[in-house]
Amino acid sequence: MGRYLLEVGRHPAAAAPVLALLAAAARHSAPAATAVARCPRLLPVLHALAAGPTSSAAAAADGAAPAGAAAAAARVLRIVAASAPEHARRLGADGVPSAAIQAAIAAGAASTPAGAAAWTEAVRLWAAVAAGGGAVPSVDGLYPLLSHMMAPPPPSWTPAAAAQAQALAAEVFALMAVLVPLLPAAAGGALKTQGWVPPPEEGGEAAEEEEGASEHPSTVMTMSSGGAPLSWSCAGGAAVAAEAWVMKPPPPLEPAGGGGTPGGGGGGGGASPAAGPDMSRQT
């Protein structure tokens, strides 16, 4: 029935409850998740939803699901991928993580609520498929986007925006934690700097570049599912970003009687309460 409503009925009002029901069923147990995965044509339908509409005109003409359906479909697929390695490998072979990432890019900047929701589910799906041994995009090609998500929010941001940034950064760091164990096998022989660019040393020779030198790959965003999912250079960049979070001083306390603590949301401790559950959540 759920697949029929999503594939044939295509009523916008039915998308959210059907996807919520599928997520609850898949989360119930591994056999229930397998039942969702083996429902005829359901995974391709969820894949199409997670990829998002190709254009607003096509979405309007086709009776597409409302905003937020892509993230909700990616959530169902993520729960299925986390339930068994066979499902993760199938979703990876079908290119589901790449489709979810492309939909997150189309959803807008990660600093907006819609963009943050799309990126959160896309990154979680990415991590779940990688943890199950499925094929995933390379971090190197998307590092220009991920590096901004891992950076601590500036003090000028509102507490709500800072908490949103902290929660998304936690998901990206969780993805890196899943991919780091693959580094020794991915390294092979000689190491090549493909992603993060180390900062040049003062007085070094980094400033002397050849004329006509091309841009470094870490400044150009690409989507690639071949090769290693994470390079040592990008892993080093993620480590530097993590160190910035650890070494960041706590925000100043507001005088008694004031409003909420700026940038922290919880009073002088630093991390927002909203960031805590996401830091350890990998379901």
Image (tube, helix red, strand yellow):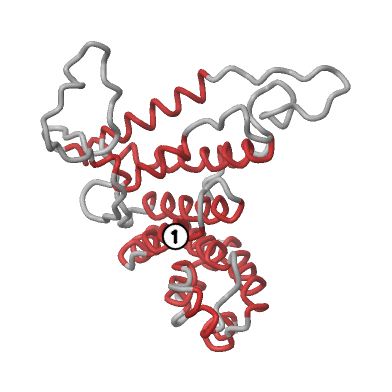
Q: Residue furthest bottom?
A: 8
Foreground residue, 142 or 127?
142
Percent of width and height locating residue 28: 60, 62
Name the residue located 41 percent from the left edge and 38 percent from the top edge.
147
Q: Residue furthest right?
A: 257
Name the residue located 64 percent from the left edge and 40 percent from the top edge.
161
Percent of width and height locating residue 150: 46, 36
Residue 16 lies in what quarter of the image? bottom right
Residue 268 lies in what quarter of the image? top right
Percent of width and height locating residue 204: 20, 14
Q: Amino acid at mark 1?
A: Ala
Instruction: Kindly state the secondary structure of the residue where label 1 is placed.
Output: helix
Q: Describe residue 220's horizontal placement relative to residue 151 as left or right.
A: left
Q: Describe residue 100's horizontal placement relative to residue 194 as left or right.
A: right
Foreground residue, 266 or 147?
147
Name the residue located 46 percent from the left edge and 37 percent from the top edge.
173
Foreground residue, 238 or 251?
251
Would you place residue 247 above or below residue 139 in this image?
A: above
Q: Residue furthest front?
A: 211
Give the class, few, some or many, for how many residues have Cα within 10 Å of label 1's Cα (few <14, many ≥20): many
Would you place residue 15 above or below residue 234 in this image?
A: below
Residue under label 1:
81
Would you place residue 15 above or below residue 249 in this image?
A: below
Percent of width and height locating residue 71: 54, 61
The quadrant the N terminus occupies is bottom right
